[in-house]
Image (cartoon, grey):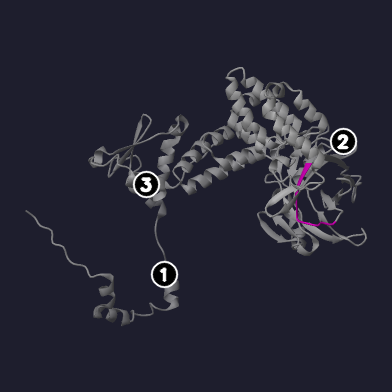
């Protein structure tokens, strides 16, 4: 019988204080090893490519495998160390789960339940643990994102999220709808918001008028109705779209299910933004006749808003906020002729003269300057969208500025301009913008506008200037919205006899203690 002799190892305290240890510390290293010059000459060597290749050999390899993953009808040889090193979920499975207790190593199996779509990409997903890289495509990115989110692999989740975000921002409506279905199914909130607020919001009318609208799952319809960025004629348009979806659903499901869907949808509709004649049309609609007790409170609150909004500050819920409506009362139309208007075009006014909208020539493009003509008493949040129309008056694209907060005069920060993901002072940004404004605000080169029929979400840019003007010496704000060179050239190609037709939508809220209400 063989025996194993254990050698005692001194603890940390004894190792530190032994005379031999102290003597070695006091002995200088040979030569100039302790000098900074020697340290600077030290090189780190290695071959990461060969290292990755050697590790990759163990992917789905029974050699040294200590776990077998059963995914559907497939079995994969894996290694606990490789899986646990990148996934806390797998580590917890191995540590906490008692499925493998008492089994020989070669018989240990772990069954994981995945959807059919995720089963198809699981080999690629598992391979990522052994090489740290993966190929993404429009057919696999969403399933890999689901797996990465489930097993909390941040590096892969971030890569899939960025890949999908880039495709959603390209304005592909069909892809956005497909990804929204997955996002709703797996509760991927960030992806769902990106799909809705991007391609779907910009092309909402196209979606509602297509057969796809009536076939959407209820979770997707609810997610769409939540968005404040929907580009629609008015709020009644959304009510009518919801009504058609519910009436179509009644053909294939019970009345109780339709009632539950209606109860979920109604809080997302902004009845307060409907005109009186539209509210009357809602009361007379087939949906309201069928479910009047459910709609009664929403209609009553909308009538109360119509009467008291200007005198009462109690309307602080998101249901009282407008969306990007394109009707004439909410969207101001202006024209700018690329050749005739050398400096500026005639101004337009919005909100009983509260805002002045003035198109000005800016190098080879146009700057839509929006001027607040009245002083502020409190912080105000401003959302600005600029529409560019085709010759036939259809919307070509929407330029959506990120929300900004205007503060009273004594609280005004220094003007800044967003430049390629960083902030810079407005005077310097003006010169830098001359070289690069075609890409900074657009997020793309605009090539997808030709022949696609889809509208993209783009972002105009420019500083918020604090000016002192001729209005009795009072101070006011001017918000620059500079259209990119590429977008301006696209718009010029669609200009009619009176020039490029723009539409400007201004939404404002009072900001106080993280609450907001509409500023009339």
In the picture, measured across the screen, residue 212 lies left or right of residue 100, that is right
Dot 1: element = loop
User: Mark 1, residues whose alpha carbon is within 10 Å: few (<14), some, or many (≥20)?
Assistant: few
Q: Position of residue 347 (x, y in %)?
A: 90, 47
Image: 495 above or below 54: above
Residue located 82% across and 32% down the image: 276
Residue 453 in view (yes/no): no
Q: Is residue 379 magenta?
A: yes
In the picture, measured across the screen, residue 358 lies left or right of residue 237, that is right
Q: CA distance from mark 2 to mark 1?
A: 68 Å
- Residue situated furthest top in the rendering: 251
Q: CA distance from mark 2 to mark 3?
A: 65 Å
Dot 3: element = helix
Q: Position of residue 325 (x, y in %)?
A: 77, 37
Quarter of the image holding residue 444? top right
User: Mark 2, residues whose alpha carbon is within 10 Å: few (<14), some, or many (≥20)?
Assistant: some
- Taking depth in this image into account, of 113 and 336 the one nearest to the observer is 113
Residue that mark 2 sits on = 496
The mark lying in front, picked from 1 and 3, is 3
User: Mark 3, residues whose alpha carbon is within 10 Å: few (<14), some, or many (≥20)?
Assistant: few
In the rendered structure, find residue 92 and report the number of the disc placed on it. 3
Q: Is residue 285 magenta?
A: no
Quarter of the image holding residue 471? bottom right
Q: CA distance from mark 1 to mark 3?
A: 40 Å
Residue located 41% across and 49% down the image: 86
In the picture, measured across the screen, residue 305 lies left or right of residue 71, that is right
Residue located 88% across and 43% down the image: 337
Q: Which residues are magenta?
A: 375-386
The answer to whether the residue labelled 2 contacts the one labelled 1, judged by CB atoms less than 8 Å apart, is no
Mark 2 / mark 1, whichever is N-terminal: 1
Residue located 53% across and 33% down the image: 185
Residue that mark 1 sits on = 42
């Amino acid at each position: 019988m063989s025996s194993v002799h254990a050698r005692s190892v001194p603890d940390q305290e004894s190792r530190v204080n032994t005379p031999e240890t102290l003597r070695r510390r006091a002995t200088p290293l040979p030569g100039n090893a302790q000098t900074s010059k020697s340290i600077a000459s030290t090189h780190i060597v290695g071959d990461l490519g060969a290292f990755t290749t050697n590790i990759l050999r163990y992917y789905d390899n029974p050699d040294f495998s200590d776990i077998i993953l059963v995914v559907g009808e497939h079995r994969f040889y894996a290694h606990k160390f490789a899986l646990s090193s990148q996934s806390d979920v797998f580590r917890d499975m191995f540590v906490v789960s008692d499925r493998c207790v008492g089994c020989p190593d070669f018989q240990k199996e772990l069954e994981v339940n995945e959807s059919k779509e995720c089963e198809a990409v699981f080999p690629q997903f598992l391979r990522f643990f052994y090489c740290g890289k993966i190929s993404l495509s429009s057919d696999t990115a969403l399933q890999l994102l689901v797996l990465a989110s489930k097993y909390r692999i941040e590096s892969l989740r971030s890569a899939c999220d960025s890949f999908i975000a880039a495709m959603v921002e390209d304005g592909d409506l069909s892809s956005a709808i497909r990804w929204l279905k997955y996002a709703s199914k797996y509760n991927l909130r960030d992806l769902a918001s990106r799909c809705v607020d991007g391609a779907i919001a910009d092309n909402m009318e196209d979606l509602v008028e297509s057969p796809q609208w009536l076939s959407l799952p209820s979770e997707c319809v609810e997610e769409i109705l939540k968005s404040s960025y929907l580009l629609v004629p008015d709020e009644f348009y959304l009510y009518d779209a919801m009504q058609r979806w519910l009436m179509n659903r009644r053909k294939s499901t019970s009345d109780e299910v339709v009632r539950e869907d209606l109860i979920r949808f109604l809080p997302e509709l902004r009845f307060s933004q409907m005109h009186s004649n539209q509210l009357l049309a809602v009361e007379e609609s087939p949906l309201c006749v069928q479910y009047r007790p459910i709609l009664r409170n929403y209609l009553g609150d909308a009538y109360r808003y119509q009467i008291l909004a200007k005198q009462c500050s109690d309307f602080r819920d998101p249901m009282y906020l407008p969306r990007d409506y394109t009707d004439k009362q909410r969207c101001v139309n202006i024209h700018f002729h690329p050749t005739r208007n050398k400096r500026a075009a005639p101004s337009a006014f919005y909100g009983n003269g509260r805002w002045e909208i003035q198109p000005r020539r800016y190098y080879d493009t146009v700057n839509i300057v929006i001027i607040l003509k009245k002083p502020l008493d409190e912080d105000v949040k401003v959302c600005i969208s600029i529409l560019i129309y085709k010759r036939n008056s259809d919307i070509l694209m929407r330029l959506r500025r990120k929300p900004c907060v205007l503060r009273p005069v004594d609280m005004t920060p220094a003007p800044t301009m967003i430049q390629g993901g960083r902030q810079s002072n407005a005077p310097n940004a003006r010169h830098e913008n001359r070289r690069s404004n075609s890409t900074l605000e657009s997020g793309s080169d605009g090539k997808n506008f030709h022949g696609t029929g889809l509208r993209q979400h783009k972002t105009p840019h420019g500083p918020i200037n604090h000016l002192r003007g001729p209005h009795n010496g009072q101070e006011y704000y001017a918000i620059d919205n500079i259209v990119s060179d590429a977008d301006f050239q696209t718009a010029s190609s669609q200009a009619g006899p009176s020039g490029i037709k723009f539409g400007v939508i201004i939404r404002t809220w009072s900001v106080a203690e993280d609450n907001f209400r509409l500023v009339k």
